[in-house]
């Protein structure tokens, strides 16, 4: 056990833990976060995804000691009590069935849209390919990503809105 | 968060209420309904994260069975004119809670957004059995509608007394009762009964039959039913705030992991506990019979200890099962353990003898896993001599009874709080982890959270049974189907679909097992085809090892409908092709060959669905296969149809087959779905989409592989699943009302969920045949299997 400092969703925490512990267990059990979830512990399904340095990262196979930058979890997407446009798109599209995997779907989509604001269908499929859903909500996830991309583009150009006839 | 408009955190809310003011707890207590303490320490501890605890730890039981014959068990109306509905079902992610609120608020005449719904908590919701059989709306919706109607009736009577006006002189809207002739005279439900009990006794021989005096409304008077309010559970699922069963934390809790036998049927020889004593946080190895678990203070410690623990096992004398590549050969040659009585129409053998053409085909479906996105998990708290289980068990009531029997503690000292969890579509009906958590908690004397690891879950969860089906069909000289023979064999000898204390895995491993297993069935197809001579037979076969096996079977989203329908609906297409008739026309001819219908109008509704699917797809009438194209990508379309209980489905798949790689992409899916009265169309559409894609995963990818000792499919690489790459570009769900009197005021609401899972396999197989002229009779259609078949037929 030793002291490890982690910055998560804007808050810095110092924890006395075994630094080789996968980040997932620290986030869930020491910081009581519910967004990242255990699905496989093998980095295969994506349920544990968090964002570090803009990269969708599988926290179940990330040693806590290796994390040097701020971690964003599902809980950190909403700002000022307002849902992130991706989260809103997920509600508008009514994406989840059980919803357990949706942390991975949303966080992977967030990393995609941050890097590629206007993804093609192929880019969406390929970027999301390793994020599994056993309720098979893929069809709605893809529609929600497109919806979110439009919403984000709308936000960005709000000072110079296109006039649509 | 605003209460009653957005209440996703079901259990958190409930706990908050128990602890807070104006709560059901306070209400029940003040009204004298509360007969037991609800304030066992863990609840307080858990609620402490939400609200300051107000009660000292209680006595820990006994926990009552809410009396279904009391209106107060179902509906509580609060002083602020809001209502809470208590229902004994669980929501597996299809939005049934939202649907119940729609139905009940309509009958009660209270705004939907002034209601909430608490589900599946054994000591505060009546035992409606939890989930199963896609029957929540079809069966349980009725008592819910009736009790809500009864509450409305009682409230009108109360208002009648208050205003000294006959009931027929009153109107009710949005929870406010007004005297028609004097609108200044009005009273809210909350003013009439908020904070008080109804004290109304209901009747009915069982929970499903629960009723008051009031009648339910005609369909035409339902306002929320048929609309699509957004599911109330979704916001907290996308912002990370929902407390799932995996998230429950209790003071003093510890973590456990199982150590499974490395070979099915292996016997425990000894455990070297010294191999893990040095692990920080190590508490104990718990072992009985062949069940082994390690318990540690922290989760990662338990994971490490389970990996590191040295256990000696003795290999079984004979192999527990054949290797997966020999499975079907084994199943065909095995002596059945039981055979269903054949269902015979006409004289099939004479008809086959007189047929102009007889066609035979064998179909095969391997074992397929539930493989939930999260492995099994549960938390059990043994404080104060009681047992509280925080569970995602879809059948929480069965878990309560099963655990009480398993641990030999009084049933009234056990309760199960249903919470949201990863869906596995039948897996949690036999909730191994719930029994394990309770057993370990009793042994350790502290709250125990147990979770399976991925390899354990994929290898050792219950399986959908493997099927082989032999089909035979006879056509006359005009291409009419005159005889059909369906004979199935299912590897389903020890079917463990329920929370039984002598069949769950921990009981098996401990040797607490029943003398005779309960076999599942080898299902026969369900359709409304009129075939003059027909025989349907099902046999059950057993693998060599019956108990303590990762190939034990359970309820996987229609326990055996996808298997039987794959055979029957693929074969109908084979017969249509042999008769050189369009597949839709061939089916419609069989469906319209009789006018006779049943009281659910399955024939009329089947015809309506097949036609609606064809129309929505833009079906081009011609026999299959179509003339083969020249490019690398071959395209085709296929249909399949079936019903389950009273719900009818026809599905059409459009495929692209890459003849160079064998890769199949289902580009489009169309589903025509008739489940009678639809409560929430948008939620139903998504349920159908998910169900079809789940079966598409079983069609294209899923197969449990094993050698002669163990299951070798144990993660998402060795047991692949559908991914975003496989997703169809377009899915159309057409909601059909094929009732001969579609506007009747008593149009029933049937179930949805599992029916759509049945036809997908055959629809895809039929589309691949249409595209390539190659008939695939063995799922899954992984690239290499398809490519091999294409090569054999010189399509490549």
Image (cartoon, coloured by chain):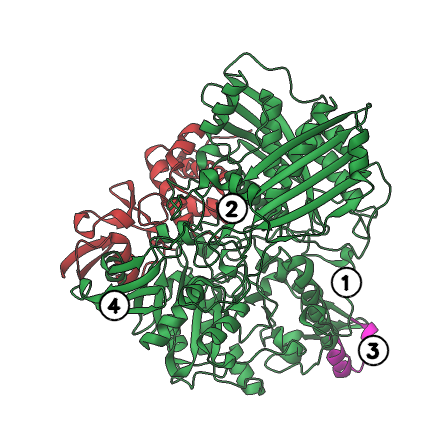
Chain colours: A red, B green
Q: Residue furthest front?
A: B317
For the residue labelled by badge 1, is the local secondary structure a helix, a strand or a loop?
loop
Q: Which mark is residue B624?
A: none
Q: Which residue is mark 4?
A: B297
Residue found at x 67% / y 38%: B568
Q: Chain of mark 2?
A: A
Q: Main secondary structure of the magenta part?
A: helix
Q: CA distance from mark 2 to mark 3?
A: 45 Å
Nearer the N terminus, badge 3 or badge 1?
3
- Which marked residue is nearer to the observer: mark 4 or mark 1? 4
Q: CA distance from mark 3 to mark 4?
A: 66 Å
Q: Is residue B24 above or below residue A88?
A: below
Near-viewer residue (B242 or B557): B557
Q: Which residue is mark 3?
A: B166
Q: Chain of mark 4?
A: B
Q: Residues within 10 Å of mark 3 (few under 14, many from 20)?
A: few
Q: Which residue is mark 1?
A: B217
Residue found at x 55% / y 66%: B119
- Write the start and end of the magenta stretch as one range: B156-170
Q: Which residue is mark 2?
A: A92
């Amino acid at each position: 056990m030793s002291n490890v400092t982690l910055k998560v969703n804007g808050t810095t925490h110092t924890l006395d833990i075994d630094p080789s512990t996968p980040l997932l267990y620290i986030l869930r059990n020491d910081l009581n976060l519910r967004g990242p979830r255990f699905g496989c512990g093998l980095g295969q399904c994506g349920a544990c995804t968090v964002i570090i340095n803009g990269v969708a990262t599988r926290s179940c196979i990330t040693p806590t000691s290796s994390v040097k930058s701020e971690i964003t979890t599902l809980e950190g997407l909403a700002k000022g009590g307002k849902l992130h446009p991706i989260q809103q798109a997920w509600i508008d599209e009514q994406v989840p069935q059980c919803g357990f995997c949706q942390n991975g779907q949303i966080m992977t989509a967030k990393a995609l849209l941050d890097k590629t604001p206007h993804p093609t269908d192929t880019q969406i499929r390929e970027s999301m390919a390793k994020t599994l859903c056993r309720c098979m909500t893929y069809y709605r996830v893809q529609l929600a990503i497109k919806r979110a991309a439009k919403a984000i583009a709308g936000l960005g150009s709000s000072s110079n809105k296109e006039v649509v006839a | 968060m605003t209460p009653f408009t957005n209440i996703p955190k079901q259990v958190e809310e409930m706990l908050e209420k128990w602890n807070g003011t104006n709560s059901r707890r306070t209400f029940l207590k003040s009204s004298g309904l509360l007969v037991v303490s609800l304030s066992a320490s863990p609840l307080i501890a858990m609620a402490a994260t939400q609200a300051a605890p107000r009660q000292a730890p209680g006595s820990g039981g006994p926990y009552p069975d809410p009396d279904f014959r009391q209106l107060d068990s179902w509906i509580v109306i609060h002083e602020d004119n809001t209502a809470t509905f208590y229902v004994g079902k669980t929501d597996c992610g299809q939005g049934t809670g939202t649907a119940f609120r729609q139905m009940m608020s309509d009958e009660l005449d209270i705004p939907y957004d002034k209601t909430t719904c608490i589900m599946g908590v054994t000591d505060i919701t009546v035992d409606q059995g939890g989930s199963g059989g896609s029957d929540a709306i079809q069966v349980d919706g009725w008592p819910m509608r009736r009790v809500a109607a009864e509450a409305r009736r009682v409230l009108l009577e109360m208002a009648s007394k208050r205003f000294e006006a006959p009931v027929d002189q009153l109107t009710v809207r949005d929870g406010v009762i007004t005297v028609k002739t004097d609108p200044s005279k009005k009273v809210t439900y909350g003013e009439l009964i908020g904070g008080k009990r109804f004290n109304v006794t209901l009747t009915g021989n069982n929970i499903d039959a629960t009723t008051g005096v009031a009648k339910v409304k005609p369909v035409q008077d339902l306002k929320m039913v048929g609309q699509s309010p957004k599911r109330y559970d979704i916001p907290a699922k996308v912002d990370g705030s929902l407390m799932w069963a995996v998230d429950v934390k209790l003071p003093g809790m510890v973590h456990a992991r199982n150590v499974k036998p490395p070979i099915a049927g292996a016997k425990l020889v000894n455990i070297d506990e010294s191999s893990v004593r040095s692990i920080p946080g190590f508490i104990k190895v718990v072992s009985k019979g062949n069940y082994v678990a390690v318990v540690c203070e922290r989760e990662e410690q338990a994971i490490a200890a389970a990996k590191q623990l040295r256990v000696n096992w003795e290999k079984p004398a004979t192999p527990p099962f054949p290797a997966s590549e020999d499975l079907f050969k084994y199943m065909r040659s095995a002596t059945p353990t039981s055979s269903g009585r054949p269902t015979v129409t006409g004289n099939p053998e004479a008809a086959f003898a007189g047929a102009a053409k007889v066609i035979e085909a064998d179909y095969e479906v391997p074992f397929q896993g539930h493989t939930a996105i999260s492995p099994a998990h549960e938390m059990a708290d043994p404080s104060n001599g009681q047992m509280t289980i925080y569970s995602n068990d879809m059948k929480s009531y069965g878990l309560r009874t099963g655990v009480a029997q398993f641990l030999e503690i009084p049933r009234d000292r056990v309760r199960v709080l249903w919470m949201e969890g990863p869906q596995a579509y039948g897996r949690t009906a036999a909730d191994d982890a719930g029994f394990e958590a309770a057993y370990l908690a009793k042994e350790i004397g502290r709250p125990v959270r147990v979770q399976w690891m991925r390899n354990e879950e994929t290898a050792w969860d219950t399986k959908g049974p493997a099927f082989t089906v032999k089909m035979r069909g006879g056509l006359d000289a005009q291409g009419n189907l005159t005889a059909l023979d369906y004979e199935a064999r299912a590897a389903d000898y020890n079917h463990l679909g329920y929370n039984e204390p002598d069949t769950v895995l921990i009981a098996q491993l401990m040797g607490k097992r029943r003398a005779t297993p309960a076999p599942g069935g080898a299902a026969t197809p369900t359709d409304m085809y009129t075939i003059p001579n027909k025989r349907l037979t099902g046999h059950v076969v057993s693998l060599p090892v019956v108990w303590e096996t990762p190939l034990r079977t359970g309820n996987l989203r229609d326990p055996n409908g996808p298997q039987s329908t794959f055979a029957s609906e693929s074969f109908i297409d084979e017969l249509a092709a042999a008769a050189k008739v369009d597949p839709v026309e061939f089916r419609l001819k069989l469906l319209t060959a009789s006018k006779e219908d049943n009281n659910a109008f399955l024939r009329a509704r089947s015809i309506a669905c097949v036609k609606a699917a064809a129309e929505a797809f833009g079906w081009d009438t011609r026999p299959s296969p179509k003339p083969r194209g020249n490019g690398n990508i071959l395209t085709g379309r296929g249909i399949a149809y079936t019903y389950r209980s009273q719900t009818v489905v026809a599905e059409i798949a459009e495929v692209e087959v890459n003849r160079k790689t064998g890769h199949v992409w289902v580009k489009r899916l169309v589903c025509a779905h008739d489940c009678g009265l639809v409560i929430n169309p948008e939620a139903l559409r998504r349920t159908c989409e998910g169900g079809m894609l789940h079966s598409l995963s079983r069609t294209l990818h899923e197969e449990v592989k094993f050698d002669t000792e163990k299951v070798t499919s144990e993660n998402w690489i060795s047991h692949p699943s559908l991914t975003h790459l496989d997703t169809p570009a377009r899915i159309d769900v057409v909601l059909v009302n094929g009732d001969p009197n579609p506007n009747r005021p008593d149009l029933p609401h049937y179930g949805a969920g599992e029916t759509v899972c049945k036809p997908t396999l055959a629809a895809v197989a039929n589309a691949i045949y249409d595209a390539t002229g190659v008939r695939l009779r063995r799922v899954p259609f992984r690239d290499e299997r398809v490519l091999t078949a294409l090569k054999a037929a010189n399509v490549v």
